[in-house]
Amino acid sequence: MTKNELRMKKLSAISLGCDKNKVGLEKMLGQVSEYGLEVVADIHEADIVIVNTCSFILAAEEEAVDTIIEMEALREKGVIEKLIVSGCFPERHSNLQENFPYVDRFMKLRENDNIVNIIESLYGVEQSKLKPTLARVLTSPKSYAYLRIADGCNNVCSFCTIPRIRGRYKSEPMDELVSEAKMLVDRGVKELILVAQDTTRYGEDLYGKNCLIELCEKLSKIKGLTYIRLHYLYPELVDDTLLKYISKNPKMCKYLDIPLQHIDEGILKSMRRKINEDGTRNLINNIQTNYPEIKVRSTFIVGYPGESGKIYNKLCQFLREAKLDYVGFFAFSKEPNTVAYYQKKQIPRFIKMRRLKKIEKLQNDIFLDKAIEEIGKTYDVLVDRYDENSGDYFGHSEFLSPTVDFGIRFADNGKVKQGDIIKVKIVDFDGGDFKGEAL
């Protein structure tokens, strides 16, 4: 086969896992697209399929395995010609080929930049000498995009597999991030969501100091960029310097994603978190008292080893008192090769699931009260997509992060298109989305 014949092939991909993983896939799709392969959405139209996997917890691995098996069936029948598996699953496990015989290639994370050469090798084509590229094929609406500012993690929390999978923390060079951001904005992106395993430590490994604010300041100067949103901020580094910067910079979303994980002193220490109970309470109180315009999203783990009924009730009471804006919950997942895997006082699964459902109900009641308070307010809404079935547009404000929080839906007023920022008055909340009227 010649290179020109290979360029006639079509490629599709399935993205599993977090938004950081999605960025890796989008960059691979950018490379193959620049090479000349056509990227298609429908798996059944493709000759080549990439399954980009997650392996953070057992549930993610099960989803990865199920998806790979489903694609193997298409490979066996000849519906697709080549099947490639990338992401964290191949990084975490070895000897996968003997268990998945219809996968043509399992890729390590460090091989992402070589996706074109890997495809060439699968078809027996002489490998090209390719230059580095910033190209990306966005899999999210063009209104927003994720900007991965670092990979890996140095925090070694007791329950987390990421350091073993992704390695030590590695910041992306600032000038490359700014160039990538400009490219995305030139393509119509209005909001950049900065992501990493820990965005608060950006630059410490590369420049010997914390450079998150410096990076945000450079991004803020990009013409056409409206919003910058921060995800995955470790609580011990969310200080007044950062909070004041977010509060004063009009391009910074008044929104923070801060994974707190728990409130109990003993559990936090066992988790190897770098902030204690008093520090957590002081942080939330500081934000709510001195920066009330900033919304807070967090995540918590229930059923961690040693979490007694009393400790669990303490977490519930903290949520009642703190009344955080948005909260996600996870039942503790016992992951091999983590410290928590070997800890005593493991909680039975049925207790974890019962606690999970109970605390989700508690937080849902808290949020419903907050949602009622939003009715009648008007927000600038970034339009993400149009739903042909309902005839409604869907978008989000700077106080709502796309994909993880509730959205805002409203009827077409005849003047709206994707990527616009328009005034929307909130008129109702249906339990799934806010309903609004475009003004």
Image (spheres, helix red, strand yellow):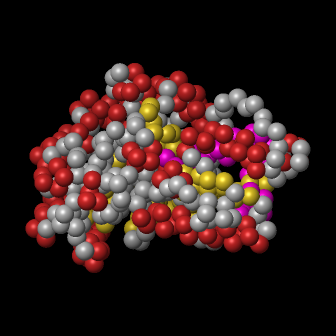
Asked if the stretch drawn in magenta spans residue 333, the answer is: no
Lateral position of residue 258 relative to residue 174, left or right: left
Rendering coords of residue 258 (x, y %): 31, 47
Please tell me which residue lies in front, 127 or 132: 127
Vertical relation: 176 (above or below) 165: above
Question: Is residue 164 at all visible to an observer of this figure?
Answer: yes
Please tell me which residue lies in front, 109 or 144: 109
Residue at image point 46% right, 57% down: 55
Asked if the stretch drawn in magenta spans residue 30, the answer is: yes
Image quarter for residue 337?
Answer: bottom left
Please tell me which residue lies in front, 282 or 368: 282
Magenta stretch, residue numbers: 20-49
Rendering coords of residue 243 (x, y %): 28, 35
- Tell me the chief SS of the magenta region: helix
Vertical relation: 425 (above or below) 202: below
Lateral position of residue 193 relative to residue 264, left or right: right
Residue at image point 22% right, 70% down: 347
